[in-house]
Image (cartoon, rainbow, N blue to C red):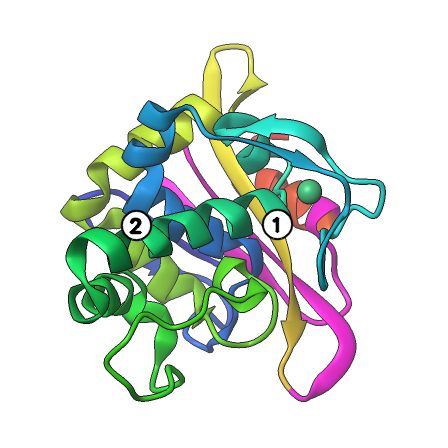
Amino acid sequence: MAVGVPDGAIKVYGEASREYPMGSLAKLVWLRLEGAEWASAGVEYKCTGTSGANTCWLKKGHGRVDLEKALQQSCNLAFLEWARLSAEEWKKYLGEGVGRLRIEEGFNPFLGNRLPPGDTVPPITPDWVGDGELLRSSPEAMLKWLLDPAQELLLVRCQRYLGVTVRKDEVWWLKSGTAPVVGEPGVTSAWVAGGNGKMVAVIHLPRGRGRVEGVERFLKVLGLK
Ligand SMILES: [Zn+2]
């Protein structure tokens, strides 16, 4: 786990610097990159659980979702659709080269050297919204990214879309996700990132754990439950 405040020291507990696939925390990167666009466009999506060759993690689908609901329920297909539309717009209005730069810069901390070389916008596959192993982070790296002054607006959006009252007068935003474990097909691990407007924390639970357990642990460790 890694805990910190903006402009302050970061505290880490346990193994916080090892990288793992980041799962649904990738949706926070999209919220940072395209959140303003998507919110002002009033994006909506009807998730039926499948779309072409792709499936959502919830088999029966999430039904009609807007940005807030898609974030709260972590609808993969909604994010995939909106990310694809954004990529199409980048290509159309910015051109392939600038579009690629945009996605490279936005996802740089999470890509390592896994982005195939080229000078065009890569196809937006489910990996880009948190499936698979393309995007990776560690609790410490994710925390540093969230605490970067450039992410100030993202934290405000997180508080608005994902805020839940955890104690009488304390609202925390929480984003949880499950992610695959590299080299162990079928095995998952869990992530939770969250903040209360002052402090931000990121926890990663090792193999075999799910998001519900992740949230429980997160709240317990921070003394919120
Ligand atoms: Zn869905």
If the picture is divided into quarters, which one holds ligand 1? top right
Q: Amino acid at mark 1?
A: Asn
As drawn, is 53 to the left or to the right of 101? right
The quarter of the rendered structure image containing the C terminus is: top right
In the displayed structure image, the side of residue 11 where residue 71 appears, left or right:
right
Q: Is residue 201 above or below residue 53?
A: above
Mark before the other along the chain sequence, 2 or 1: 1
Q: Which residue is at 59% across, 38% downward?
A: 219
- Which mark identifies residue 89? 2
In the rendered image, the residue lying farthest to the front is 92
Task: Determine whether, in the image, residue 10 is placed left or right of residue 222.
Answer: left
| Figure quadrant of residue 197 | top left
Give, as a single range, the part of the protein colored magenta.
183-212
Which residue position holds label 1?
A: 76
Say whether residue 57 is left or right of residue 125: right
Q: Amino acid at mark 2?
A: Glu
